[in-house]
Image: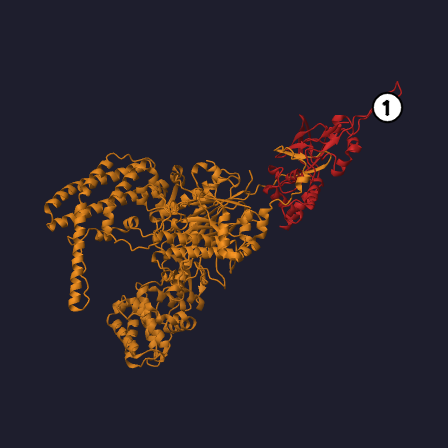
Amino acid sequence: MTRPTPWLSAFAVLADWNLDDCPWPEGPEIAMNAMVKSQGDQGELNFVATRREILEAFLHPNEDDDMQGVVESTPTVQFGFNPFAPNLFNVFRPPPPKPPRYFRALVWNLENFTNDRRPRGAKPIDSPRNLARIAMVADLAYRMGADALLLMETGADVGQAMTHMATRWQAQEEQSGDTVVRSVEPLVSPATYALPEIALAYQGVQVAAEADKVRALLLVGEGYIITPTAFPALDNGKLCAAFNLLFDTSNNVARLPELPELAGDLDSTLYNVAMWCWKMLAHYQSSMGSEADHHLLKLVLEDMIQTPGQFLTQPENDYGNFHLALLTAFELANDYSPSPEAGGAEILQLLMLAWILRRNLGTLQEKPSISQPQQFNQFFGTYTPPPIPLPAQRQFWLNGYGDSPDLVATVLLVACGQTFDLAAHDPDNGAVASCSDGELLPGGLARLGLLTLPHAETYGVVYRPYSSQHLEWFFDSPFQDLGYSTSGMYGILHGDKNRTLRAQSPTDALNGRSALIIRFPVSEKLKVPFALHHNRYSPNKAIKEMDTEFTGERAILARLQTLEDEASMLALKDFDPAPLIVGDFNVPSGLVQAESGAKSTTAAGKRRRKLRKLHVSQMAAAGYVRRRRGDRTHPQTTLKVPANIARDRAPYSEPYDAVYQPFDFLDGEANVRSAAVHNVQRLIPPALLQQTISVPGAFGMSQTVALSTVVREQMEYIYLGIVRRILTTLGDAQAWLQANLAANESKQAYTQADDMLRGQFTAFCKWLEARRKKFAELLGQNLLAPCVPTSLEDWFGELRKAIAKIKPFVEGAKKKAAAARKAERERLKKEAKRTGKKTRRKKPQPQSSTSVPLLDQLDAELDEEMQSLFDEEDDEGEETEVIATKPKQKRKTPGQERMLKLGELFDALLHLEQYPDLRLWGAYRNIVSDHLPLLVEIDLEPGSS
Amino acid sequence: MPKLKIAAGDSVARLAGAAGVAPDTVWSHPDNARLKARRDHMDVLAVGDVLTVPEPEAKTQQCATGKRHRFRRHGVPMRFTLQLLDEAGQPRKGRPFRLEVDGTPQEGSTDGDGVVQVYLPTAARQGVLVVDDLMLQLAFGVLEPKSGLAGVQQRLTNLGFPCLQDAGRLGSPTRRALRAFQQLAGLTVTGKLDDATRSALDDHHTQRNKLAQQLANADAGT
């Protein structure tokens, strides 16, 4: 297969890929006019002033008119011959290696690639699905001769993901047989929202506990394993010192008693006992201990003494001294008034120690040391404090979420001046170097209430530099983003002191999101700039309070306005040259694409039109126009859910992904073409299916799996899902019929229908199960071949007829239920009139024989996978109703919805067996993404042959 | 007296040789005075130039009979001098070469500056020069004057800034090449064709080691 090179256009080489080409919109001057119009006269003046040079160059492209008088005629060129003069000195130098003519980027939203903040769909990086996804994406990048992969919706472990991708891609480059093998470099973007910097130490680095470190640990709160080293005996004095250290140096510790998670009353859980101890200790230390606190302290002590097993595994045998200390403390508590000086803090520290021992040293069989020095206490006089044996090496899992008990232990141990090893830890992948830090730190800060957690994201980039020189340029050039100076060629777009970027502000619509600005060098002087953006809706207060009379359009407005804001930021600031804005903007077609045919006269239609015009003019005012196809529509780039793909045979729905191009991109010295890859056979070609991936197996061994296996499993998964859905729906319908039968309504008719359906259902279920097995078997032999349905259509036909007979009963039941509701309303009205009080309507009894069907409870029984397949609440990938101007129709119950969609499910099943492309689309959607890749190719020598 | 319109590959040396007159005689002819004023060198003419080539004049020479007399034809061979650089601009010093012109091969070595110097018949139009992995097709007498766009494009191409695909028009490739050359030569980078650029181009194309030195300086600068 010919592969596009830096000098060969992908559009020429991949002609048979049916790339959905999106050229520059026809007549950019129209957009420019709109821009000038929207900005008024002053806008026009500003525009001309700032772009005078470009305009002049455009109007007078050839200033060498005098050449006409100099060149008498054009000589015939002998291509391949170099012209020289006889009897003169001549010089010849071969041209240096040809600079690349094309720069190609693949822009791809790899939905929930890794462990991002949303659990939906996220899986560990080494899951078969993610490894298959990596292989497929890397393969396509290689085959398209991409220079860069620009990926959105990557998670905190984006570094790992990009490294995997680059490694796979690099391996293919090395096997390509090219004389010069280009390197493939993984890049990780910063988070889209600036986070506080907290110094961290990593695995194998021994650090001494310091106030800052303790603070960092408290803030982090999740995901660290701490291994104390050279642990000396821990005594009460050390504990006091530790607490004082924490209290004096950390506002967070001082705030601990105020935290909601510590505010609960003492109950029987060990964790709460420990946390309560912290709280009490803080009270005592700040001279705030009250009578009530003291009373509670005595209760706790009493509880510990009376039920020692709760705190000490073998209190009598191995920790007798400690138990004795508790008894003493109890007596002490009975005798003194609460104050730190009186020893209340020590009592609490003893409690905490008891708790620590219970948690972490319960199985330790060491005898306590008796070599502790004696201490003086005003109540005991001279005494030997109970020594607390601690192991030399023991791991503590620091996790501040929920009821994690190790938080207290860890903080105490760290604060005691010991040294320890600190290993960042990924909950799913075990100990890792540092990949989760981006998530851990803000999580910890948010838990402490010190930070409004933004929906910060990361972007993943895999870069294949043209040469090592280009890579050097990439990293050596300074990057000055808006308001922030960082090194390197890429960074996150920020606002400045005068203006906040709306997408990024944690209190605004997209709270914490922003674009990655990245410039790829194509020569020492010329860099190709991109702004990579993911514009996702996250419900928040700002969106709820958005100023619009239509609630349904708030989320859409959030997306539009943040995008427009970003474009204007790029245009207004000194950001030269203006970048292409690429990415997933989640803007449905109704808001970017003019209506075809007659214009809608409904309020919703008018509103859509108004918003569309506003959006286009706002983007144009910033100098941007959205690229579209030649037929003036925008390419559809998102995919439906698998069941709908199977049913409709049109896998994509909305043009969410796009390229916005500035009018004067690279001063007109480059020509941009973009295209959506709509050919699933090219996305998942048969040769790719033969490749393998290495996935983790049992006992830490890896095993090799063919990509075809992963794809096949996804197809089976989709097929099985539809089968289960049909069976569940039919079973539910049958149960409903029987319930009506029991109610003795139209007994004869029901019996007839029920008998007929029962027979059909039973036979069909058996047949469907056999069919599923056959499907899996045939699928294994050849993924792309149709599965040759034999009598499937006949079966469906029979079943459809049978189901049609249910309809009258369903309709009858609905009418009856409606009448019952009406009667109930009337009754309530009369009741209210009679008593003068409002009376609550009784909730309809579930499972009533007359209740409108059917399957609500079954939804709860469906497993999560099924829910995700059929009831996916996803604001991406499906047709979006933009503006809701009319009240929605009365919502059908999920059971009704499913019944009505039964025919569609039959079609989906049939199509999955008949049309191989649909199967591949479904598999692509499940494995790779619900977005199609967008190819952006930049011709740096426009006009050259 | 015939007036010839210059075609591609014509030079005074070739036309004079064909006519049987000395090149200097042709170039100094009063009818060529205007052309001579416009062109820098008699072997770098533009397509379309009109050259007067005088008829060979009969010359009477007194010779004694019974003796042997030797007559020497003046200035017949055409000298071809070419400095060969590599992509980085380093001279290809002391490299063996093979030049084949009209079926006649010549072999030799480049000198310490990477220069090939050979004598060719004036009728020679094309040749192939092979040095190491470089195979260069030569067209003699095709170089246009520096004042014209074609001459500029030819010189740019020879100096490693190819733009002949854009021959005859000042399009993007030529502008790019001009910019690259201007940057190398330390001129103001405009992408436009001005006198300074023309002059610098000719200097680099006709002066030994000038281009090599500039490239070395540029390398050191980076």
Which chain is displayed in orange in the rendered image? A
Compared to residue A623, the image places residue B113 above or below, namely above
Q: Nearer the viewer, residue A327 or B111?
A: B111
What residue is at 20 percent from the left and 41 percent from the top? A765
Q: Is residue A226 visible?
A: no
> Where, by quadrant of the figure, is residue A768 drawn?
top left
Q: Position of residue A874 (x, y in %)?
A: 33, 52
Q: Nearer the viewer, residue A856 or A64?
A: A64
- Disc 1 marks a residue whose amino acid type is Thr
Q: Please state, as top left, top right, bottom left or bottom right, where the N terminus of chain B lies in the image.
A: top right
Within-10-Å neighbours for mark 1: few <14, some 14–19, many 20+: few
Give SS at disc 1: loop
Compared to residue B101, the image places residue A402 above or below, namely below
Compared to residue B66, the image places residue A233 above or below, namely below
- The numbered mark 1 sits on a residue in which chain? B
Residue wearing tag 1? B60
Q: Position of residue A81 (x, y in %)?
A: 63, 33
- Pick out the residue farthest to the top: B66
Q: Position of residue A794 (x, y in %)?
A: 22, 36
Q: How many marks?
A: 1
Which chain is displayed in red in the rendered image? B
Q: Is residue A476 left or right of residue A909?
A: right
Q: Nearer the viewer, residue A13 or B146?
A: B146
Compared to residue A443, the image places residue B173 above or below, namely above
Q: Position of residue B64 (x, y in %)?
A: 89, 20
Q: Is residue A80 left or right of residue A485?
A: right
